Image (spheres, grey):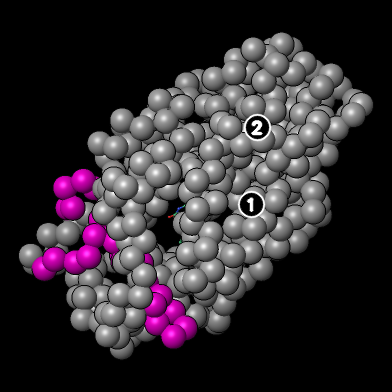
Amino acid sequence: MAAQDFSIAIIGAGIGGLAAAAALRLVGLDVRIYEQASAFARIGAGIQQSPNSIKVLRRLGLEDRLSAAAFRPHSALNRQSDTGEVTWERMLGDDAERHFGAPYFLMHRGDLHEALASVVPDDIIERNRKLVGLNQTEDGVTLEFEDGEPVTADVVIGADGVHSVVREALLGVESPRWTGRVAYRTTYPASLLGGMEIDDCAKWWGPDRHIVMYYVTPRRDEIYFVTSTPEPDFKVESWSAKGDLDMLRDAYKDFHPQVRAVLDACPEVHKWALVERDPLPKWGEGRITLLGDACHPMTPYMAQGAATSIEDGAILSRCLDGVDRAGVARALRRYEDSRKARTARIQTISRLNDMNKIKAEIETTYGYDVWTAPLAEEMAE
Ligand SMILES: Cc1cc2nc3c(=O)[nH]c(=O)nc-3n(C[C@H](O)[C@H](O)[C@H](O)COP(=O)(O)OP(=O)(O)OC[C@H]3O[C@@H](n4cnc5c(N)ncnc54)[C@H](O)[C@@H]3O)c2cc1C
C-alpha cells in the first residue's frame, strides 16, 4: 500500500484519465481530475476492446457491466471491398477468450466511458477546468486554468489527449501529423437496415481506403461503422465535423452491396481528421508524466489507442504503489520505461495498416497482461 503523502492531478477525464484515476485509487492514492468540458458528451462511436484492456477493466470491477452492454463477436472478418472474399478471419469468440484470458468486446464508446466514470467518485472530477499552463518547482507543480484558481499538486499526469497541453509544456509546441485521411463514423439503429443482416464484425479493404462495421450491443440492435478515407483537402483545424453523406457514399460506391446498404441507411455521420505522432523519446520530467493519446496517439487500425491508454493507468498504479513523495519522480520514469517500447511498436505497426503485419502482432498485443508484465528496472537515485 502507498505511503499516501503526495497528491496526484490528472488532466483530462477521457478514457485514459478515468482508467488511471480508478487504478490509482485501487492502490490507495489521492487523485483529482481536471477536465475542460462541462459535461461528458455521448458521440456516435463504437469501440473495440481487446483482452489486454479487459484485464484492466476486470480489476476495476467493470467486466460484468461491460459484458451486459457490449457485443461479443465470434470473429472479425477481413474482406475484399468489391468481391467480399474473406482474406482473414480473426477469431474472437470462446476459444480466443480462453487463450488470451479475457473476452473481446465491441461496444458503444459512451458505454465504456460511462462505465469508467462509474468507478471514479464524481466529487474528484472538476469540470470546466481547461489547463492552460503549468510550472514545476522543487515543491510541486502549479497548474493554471482558463477559469478558476490555480492548483498545486505533487504529481501531474497529462491525460489530455492528442492536443495535450501538458505534452506541449514538456516538449514544445508541435502539431500532430495529419495523415491526409478522415474517419467517417456513426452509430445508428439496426432497424434502419429494414431486416437486412450484416456481418457481426467486418473490415472491408479497398485499394486505398477501408471501412469497419460491427454491432455494438448484445441484441445486435445498433450498428457502427468507421472509415479511413483519403481526403487530403479536409481542413485539419476542424478536426471533428459533420460529414456529408453524399460524399461518403460516393467514396464507397465501388464497395460490396453490404457496405453500400449500410451507408445508404445511415441518417447522419461525423468525420474526424486522423492524426498521429512518431513515438516520443520522452514522456515526462520530474513529477510530470503523460498517458494515452497525449504521448502515443496512433491511427486506429489496430483498435489499440484506448486499450493502450487503459493499460498505461494500470502500469502507472503498479509503479506508484508503495512509493513515497521522495520517490515519485523515479517511479514515473520507471512507468515510462515500462511502457514506451510496447506503445511505440503498436503505433508503428498500426500506421502501416497491413493485414499480415497486424496478424503477426495479435499474440503479443492481446496476450499482454498488465498485472504480470515485468516492469522496467528502477533507476538508481
Ligand atoms: C476513428 C477512431 C476510432 C477509434 N477506435 C478505437 C478502438 O476501436 N479501440 C481503441 O482502443 N481505441 C480506438 N481509438 C482510439 C481512442 O479513441 C483513443 O486512443 C482514446 O480515446 C485516448 O484516450 P485519452 O484519454 O488518452 O484521450 P481523449 O479520449 O482524447 O481524452 C482527453 C480528455 O482530456 C480533456 N482535455 C484535453 N485538453 C484539456 C485541457 N487543456 N485541460 C483539461 N482537460 C483537457 C478532453 O476534453 C478529454 O476529455 C479510435 C480513435 C479514432 C479517432
In the rendered structure, which segment of residues is drawn in magenta? 196-221
Going by the picture, which residue comes out furthest to the left? 195
Q: How many marks?
A: 2
Q: Residue at x 64, y 52 (%)?
A: 343
Q: Please name the amino acid that badge 1 sits on.
A: Thr
Please state if 365 lies on the left or on the right of 201 as rendered.
Answer: right
Can you say whether 196 is above or below 112 in the image? Answer: below
Quarter of the rendering occupied by the N terminus: top right
**Where is residue 188 shown, x and y percent of the image?**
24, 58
Going by the picture, which residue comes out furthest to the bottom? 254
Q: Residue at x 59, y 18 (%)?
A: 27
Please state if 169 lies on the left or on the right of 112 as rendered.
Answer: right
Could you tell me which secondary element the residue under label 2 belongs to?
helix
Any part of residue 373 in sight = yes
Can you say whether 251 is above or below 119 in the image? Answer: below
Dot 2 and dot 1 residues touching (CB under 8 Å): no
**Where is residue 322 shown, x and y percent of the image?**
70, 16
Q: Which residue is mark 1?
A: 343
Nearest the camera: 211 or 346?
A: 346
Q: Which residue is mark 2?
A: 316
**Where is residue 97 shown, x and y percent of the image?**
35, 43
Q: Residue at x 41, y 38 (%)?
A: 101
